[in-house]
Amino acid sequence: MTSTIKDVSLDQAQGAVDAGRRRALELDLLMNVAVVDVGGHLKAFARMDGAWLGSIDISIKKARTARYFDMQTAELGPTVQPGQPLYHIEFSNGGLITFPGGIPLTLTDDTVIGAVGVSGSTVDNDQAVAEAAAEVIS
Amino acid sequence: MTSTIKDVSLDQAQGAVDAGRRRALELDLLMNVAVVDVGGHLKAFARMDGAWLGSIDISIKKARTARYFDMQTAELGPTVQPGQPLYHIEFSNGGLITFPGGIPLTLTDDTVIGAVGVSGSTVDNDQAVAEAAAEVIS
Amino acid sequence: MTSTIKDVSLDQAQGAVDAGRRRALELDLLMNVAVVDVGGHLKAFARMDGAWLGSIDISIKKARTARYFDMQTAELGPTVQPGQPLYHIEFSNGGLITFPGGIPLTLTDDTVIGAVGVSGSTVDNDQAVAEAAAEVIS
Amino acid sequence: MTSTIKDVSLDQAQGAVDAGRRRALELDLLMNVAVVDVGGHLKAFARMDGAWLGSIDISIKKARTARYFDMQTAELGPTVQPGQPLYHIEFSNGGLITFPGGIPLTLTDDTVIGAVGVSGSTVDNDQAVAEAAAEVIS
């Protein structure tokens, strides 16, 4: 029997990007914000003027990583260190990012409908902006 | 608001692969049969003993191409020839296949829930086996 | 002496994406719209709900191609045919797209500040939506 | 004189995938199970409904890694750590995986005829399911 799944809409995705952008402005940061859909495919993206060029790919990879494993990229970090269980998992899937800034987008019942990835500053700042973006989804 | 989409299940995908395999046996062919889900990601795959190694990638790319554009790969063929509108579209998306053998998997109301790709013989044979695989979905 | 260059801002890029999205709605089309900056790097992107997954990469590649050569992708098409001067240029730069839908974003004095790429329908429709997006820049 | 090699058949490969799937159900896990042949090429694959998207590539890479070096991926882990002999071997071969979940498929005389790779949970769970899959080969 066919499975039924929920997917982020463009309006939701754009809302998440805008929320991230607003939070970045409040924190005086220049960010790249990417949203992927339930299949891990790019849905919406914005790079603030002056934000790092190298963060385009990282923000998209953070979002994809968060959806590919249905967890925050921050959770993967400890598991991929030398000697830890998932050491060098980043080599898979055309490149993963395993530090903070990628968060699944979830409904109130925890259904994952996509993910957001933010890059452009310290990982703490990236995470803060990603949280602001993810919060607008419900 | 969240979108709701239908996705092929593993049981359906395996059923399609098995149907393709049966049809290949009837036609005395050695085939690779790949099914991707609604997001274009590999769901089920089988390579018959002795089937071409080069057809693994082609069968998967046919399935992905069919889902990426919600049409049979056979339909793309005429549009990608020299002088035609989509000339060299195959360079995109990490490689597309635009000859017969890729077919969207659809419900009776035409909703696309994935796609099947078959490779291992002439394009006519590939197409025939893909049709047999796609027919079991409803 | 240092060069001074003009670059599309995020507000302009988002404005172009929104204009493309509005035109697509008017034409009853489902589109991917991508804007790259003066350096050819992704600046803003939106995929309408239900738009082809295969058009994400194509819209971005159209935009990049248009900026990389400061011309519409439609202009490249005739030059890349078999026997023509730029045959197989699509192999370069990690993949180019040489059919309609990519347009440089220019100021009134013809300075190129970025480019837009649109994919999701026929090349004529893609081009029409890209033109609507490009028109808002001045 | 010509070499003779033994290769996993599709029936064996599908049997291993099914055994892995049954073990995953017993353990209440959602897994990707991939089998490669003696040449390291994909032979059979199944992704259970809801299994991580990021584990498609990892399961295939685990299987290929196990066959490429005729050892369990778990055995490679200690040798690829910083300062160890095979540090960064994961960069080779288009990407290897060196944590548990990949196991060679062997006959009773230890002849390697292919490999299985499992991904979708903790490495311990991945390994347990891969063992169940490998056990059906003899």
Image: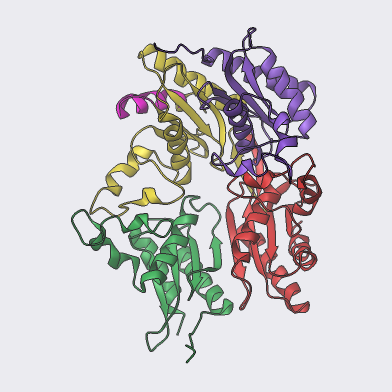
Chain colours: A red, B yellow, C green, D purple
Pinpoint residue A104: horizontal percent, then vertical percent: 73, 52
Pinpoint residue A103: horizontal percent, then vertical percent: 74, 55
Task: Report the quarter where the C terminus of chain A lies.
Answer: bottom right
Asked if residue C51 lies left or right of residue B82, the reply is: right
Name which residue lies at 59% across and 32% down. Answer: D60
From this view, report whether residue C82 is shown above or below residue B20.
below
The dominant secondary structure in magenta is helix
Whether the magenta-drawn stretch holds residue A98 is answered as no
From this view, report whether residue B59 is shown above or below residue C129.
above
Q: Quadrant of residue C103?
A: bottom left
Task: Report the quarter where the N terminus of chain A lies.
Answer: top right
Q: Is residue C28 visible?
A: no
From this view, report whether residue B62 is shown above or below residue A67.
above
* Residue nearer the viewer, C66 or D43: D43
From this view, report whether residue C98 is shown above or below residue B39.
below
Asked if residue D24 lies left or right of residue B116, the reply is: right
Q: Quadrant of residue C120?
A: bottom left
Q: Is residue C110 visible?
A: yes
Pinpoint residue B55: horizontal percent, then vertical percent: 41, 29
Whether the magenta-drawn stretch holds residue B127 is answered as yes
Range covered by the magenta-colored residues: B120-133
Name which residue lies at 46% across and 18% down. Answer: B48
Q: Residue furthest left?
A: C83
Asked if residue C84 lies left or right of residue C68, the reply is: left
